Image (cartoon, grey):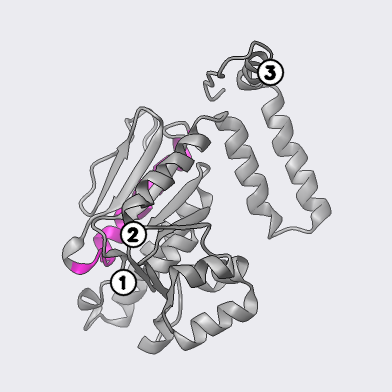
Amino acid sequence: MPLNVPLRTEFATIKLEIGADRVGLITLNRPEVRNAMNSQMMTDLRDCFQQFYVQENAAACLVITGVGDQAFCSGGDLKERRGMTDETWRRQHAIIEQAVKAMHDCPIPVIAAINGAAYAGGMEIALACDFVYAAEHAKFALTEVTLGIMPGAAGTQNLPRAVGVRRAKEIILTGTPFTAADGYEWGMINKVVPGPELMGAVMETARKIASNAPVSVRQAKKSMDKAGDLDRASGYAFEIESYNRTVGTADRQEGINAFNEKRKPVYKGR
């Protein structure tokens, strides 16, 4: 990606809007196919998230949702995939692999706002986020084994981390759909609300995150991401390194000054 270029907000299949509150809203925008991911959407998602790795101050929190109230994302576009050669299939899948890696590497917190069905790759996109809010009517499933494949967008890695290995095996090996209430009970979903209240609840949380010191938020997220990959001693060593990165920031001084002066802090991300 070239340096010193404006953040790209125009894409063919997704919408990106960043408000004055520094919350970025990413909307999957293929309503005619329940926001199914074709090659273009996979490319758009990859390119959208990759730029935040380079321009980490472009937003303070990200929210991803689907257009409409029926589907977050129904998975890969199977009509596009019909008749694909093995070589073309693998090339296409390499794009979604890059997109998921870009989501995992995104330094900015990402909240999934699940407004409807999140099936197969759609559910995997939700799992790649930092946490999930869902509408009461939302449904989830990893249906890949019923189609002769298996989850390939980190579903076998992220789901066990969210619900435990035994529950994840049941979900993945049966391909059976489950409700938002089930996902909440199992620990995959943080909050379930009526559909009309979803975006309000998500944006309230996103704005709370965005109002905090950006460097602190990014360093804390990075440290927590390591928690599942490292033993406790190594993870704590990483945490200390992350913590020390915040000590020399102007935001650290601003936070202490604002507390003592009984005012709201004004963070600059540095």
Q: Position of residue 237 (x, y in %)?
A: 79, 45
Q: Earlier in the sequence, mark 1 or mark 2?
A: 1
> Relative to the observer, which residue lies in front, 218 or 118?
118
> Relative to the observer, which residue lies in front, 119 or 40?
119
- Dot 3 and dot 2 residues touching (CB under 8 Å): no
Q: Position of residue 92 (x, y in %)?
A: 32, 69
Q: Residue furthest left?
A: 32
- Dot 1 and dot 2 residues touching (CB under 8 Å): no
Total numbered labels placed on residues in the image: 3
CA–CA distance in space, label 1 to label 2: 18 Å
Which of pointers 1 and 2 indicates the residue nearer the eye?
2
Residue that label 3 marks: 256
Q: Position of residue 119 (x, y in %)?
A: 37, 72
Q: Is residue 19 visible?
A: yes
Q: Mark 3 belongs to which amino acid? A: Ile
Q: Residues within 10 Å of mark 2 (few under 14, many from 20)?
A: many
Q: Position of residue 152 (x, y in %)?
A: 45, 73
Q: Residues within 10 Å of mark 1 (few under 14, many from 20)?
A: many
Residue that label 1 marks: 76
Q: Earlier in the sequence, mark 3 or mark 1?
A: 1
Which is the main secondary structure of the residues drawn in magenta?
helix
Q: Quadrant of the C terminus?
A: top right
Q: Is residue 129 above or below residue 145?
A: above
Left or right, 220 with respect to 62, comes to: right
- Dot 3 and dot 1 residues touching (CB under 8 Å): no
> Relative to the observer, which residue lies in front, 19 or 128?
19
Q: Mark 1 belongs to which amino acid? A: Gly
Identify the magenta region: 33-56
CA–CA distance in space, label 3 to label 2: 39 Å
Residue that label 2 marks: 115
